[in-house]
Amino acid sequence: MRKRSTPSTSVKERVHTIGILTSGGDCPGLNAVIRAVTRGVAREGVEVFGILEGFKGMVENRYIRLTPSETSGLLTVGGTILRTSRIKPNKFPTPNGGVRDMTGAAVETYRRLNLDCLVCLGGGGTQKSAYHLMKEGRLNVITLPKTIDNDVYGTDVCFGFDTGMSIAAEAIDRLHTTASSHHRVMLVDVMGNKAGWLALAAGVASGADVILIPEIPYSLDVVAQSLLDRMRHGKMFSIVAVAEGARPRSNARRSQKDGRSQGTGKGTTAAGGLALTKEPLSVILAAHLEKVTGLETRVTSLGHLQRGGIPTPTDRILCTAFGTKAAELILTRQFGNMVAKRGEEFVAVPLKDVVGKKRLVPLDHPLIKAARATGVCLGDVWEST
Ligand code: F6P
């Protein structure tokens, strides 16, 4: 192992070695960030270790060496070459199904590799784990906001969102032609966890007729009425984009309280004037809308398709800029920060201001106004001014 001598101030301030990991659900653009960070710091002679499978690899001391040439061709590659996991260092799964605090083992890997900083790419959970290692393990960390859900607090946008949104929008475009050919109602399940960014943006981009998001609990009657109104105007098909966390009005308070999502495909319980059942929400909704409109109804679940494949050019640019800013923060030892995009700028936001918060869609967001103004039903009773 390379020994670090007791350096003079200037030598001591130089960063020699960093680790980088990807944690949580994957998304297109992770490799583009890995590439930008590696290239950005390697120019200054910094050695880079890629930690495998997120914090699991930190605990288990598993890593690879990354050089600029090894990041060649990564810009357009989806997924993550480092692989990922949702494992937290302080709640590490044990063989008997329990969890154990393995913070010490993660710190040990950091020390063994002689790291000056651990760069963590991930969503809300990752920010939390990185903050934990910073506070409890006294590690230098820098984080970047990744998620198709676009819900990391403190940044205007997360990388991966544009790609997930584009995939969902293209899918809804395709559903339009088949819906109109068959005179059907098409419900589309869109991911997004407890935030509606993905469904809202994809729905607006592809002209969905109804968009249901967690931030606006919906009324079944309002949704049904909007489809009947369309039929009265000769529109014999409709597209309903349903966000994973969308929930009916009567159920909103309870699901907010117990923190449960009315998510799709996870067997969660849905109500809202309908019988309690383990069916995914969109399936129940579809059955009801079919009864009310008399139109055949189908459900499409986009699921993990939204996280697959190559990042869009917009995400590739964003990831390269995010990674470049992270490299700048590393080289200038501005640790304990998340890289955020604010307007046109990439800035450092203290990690303590990010953790434990979620960025939901504000009810006065321009996209909500635009949806309403163009006649989209958001499932609530809304009076235009
Ligand atoms: O956070 C990204 C996301 O795709 C969410 O939209 C979704 O709720 C969740 O991850 C799915 O998780 P998993 O990949 O573990 O099924």
Image (tube, grey):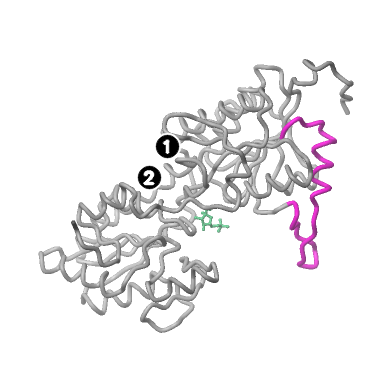
Pointer 1 residue Cβ closer than 8 Å to ligand 1: no
Residue bearing the label numbered 2: 166
Q: Which mark is residue 220?
A: none
Residue linked to disc 1: 312
Q: Position of residue 218 (x, y in %)?
A: 34, 68
Looking at the picture, how far across and down is residue 302, in whole percent? 42, 57
Location of the C terminus by quadrant is bottom left
Region rendered in magenta = 89-117
Q: Quadrant of residue 143?
A: top right
Task: State the CA–CA distance, disc 2 to disc 1.
Answer: 8 Å
Q: Residue at x 63, y 44 (%)?
A: 352
* Vertical side of 282 occupied by 47: above or below: above
Secondary structure category for the residue under label 1: loop
Vertical relation: 132 (above or below) 344: below
| Count of numbered marks | 2
User: Are the residues tagged 2 and 1 within 8 Å (C-beta)?
Assistant: yes
* Residue 112 is covered by the magenta coloring: yes
Quadrant of residue 44 in the image? top right
The residue under the point 59% across, 41% down is 80
